[in-house]
Structures are given as C-alpha cells and as structure tokens.
Amino acid sequence: MNKQHHKRQSPKPPMLVLREIEKDVETQEWMCLTALMNGVAQRSHYDFLAKMLNMLLIAGDSAKHRQPAFDYADKVFKPVMASIKARHKATGKLGVNSHELTTLRKVVQFNHAFWQKQPGELYVNVHAEVEAFYASLERTK
C-alpha cells in the first residue's frame, strides 16, 4: 500500500484552548451587562461589547452560511449599541433600559452559541482583524 505524506499546515490553536478563551470572553460579556444594568458601566464595558459586535459582523460576513450572524448583529445588536451610545451622549451615563438589557442577554447567548459552532481558526482570525483595526484607529489619533 502506497502511503502519501501530506504537507502539514501550520499548527492551529487547540480547540480546548479556544473554548476556554471563549468562556473567559463570555464571562466578561456578562460582567459588562451587569455593569450596564447597575449603572456603573465604564467606557471599557461599552468598548468590549462593541468589539463583540464587530466580531459578529466580520464573522457573519465571512461566508454565506454565517450570514445569519451578520444579520442578527446588524438588526438586533447594533441598534441597542447605538441606543446606549445616544443615551450616553445625552446624559453622560452608560446604562440600559429593560428592553435593551433583555436584548443584550439574548445577544450574549447568541454569541456563545454562534462561536461554539465555528472553527477555532475563524475566532482567531476575526479577533486578529478586529484588534488590527483598533490598533490602526489608535495610530491615527
């Protein structure tokens, strides 16, 4: 029997490591919601959720079968973030109303379920793309 040797691709982060990262991220997401709910949110809480939104938009736009994630982020998540931002501009405080809080809770659950079904490389690549974008914004300040 003739065995062919295949060229190995560069190593990918182990799936279990990525799942642990996702657990840490999900914990931070819930902490951001708690801070918003209790009226003690800082800009960093909003920024963390904005990063989550951007990651869903990018991942959802990466393949046709992921389009529902893009649509959910665009039609459900983005309006809530815009509302929080508008309220902050008007009042100087970061907070949520009950409808927004309910929606954000569902968003965190959606985000978790979405990433659990994706290959680990997608998370790594999307995260890197978002970080590079934010770094480019910092350089232009």
Image: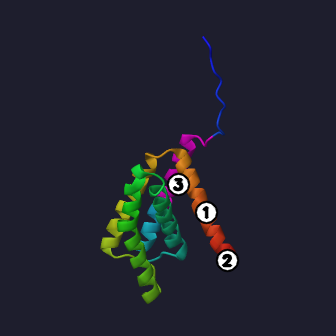
- Which quadrant holds the C terminus? bottom right
Q: Which residues are magenta?
A: 12-28
The residue that label 1 is drawn on is: 131
| Residue of label 2 | 140
**Tag 2: amino acid:** Thr
Q: Residue at x 50, y 44 (%)?
A: 119
Q: CA distance from mark 3 to mark 1?
A: 17 Å
Front of the two marks 2 and 1? 2
Which secondary structure is most common in the magenta stretch?
A: helix
Quarter of the N terminus within the rendering: top right
- Mark whose residue sits in front, 3 or 1: 1
Q: Identify the residue shown where x is 47% and y is 46%.
A: 118
Which one is earlier in the sequence, the residue at label 2 or at label 3? 3
Q: Is residue 95 visible?
A: no
Give, as a three-letter code, the residue at label 1.
Glu
Q: Disc 2 to disc 1, how far (Cα)?
A: 14 Å
Q: Earlier in the sequence, mark 2 or mark 1?
A: 1
Q: How is the image coloured?
A: rainbow
Q: CA distance from mark 2 to mark 3?
A: 30 Å
In depth, the one of 134 and 27 nearer the eye is 134
What amino acid is labelled 3 in the image?
Asp
* Label annotation for residue 24: 3
Quadrant hosting residue 38: bottom left
Residue 86 at x, y = what percent? 42, 83
Of residues 100 and 133, the one drawn nearer to the viewer in this rendering: 133
Q: Where residue 120 is drawn, which disc sits there?
A: none
Q: Secondary structure at mark 1?
A: helix
Position of residue 53 relative to residue 94, above or below, is above
Considering every residue shown, the one lying at the far bottom of the view is: 90
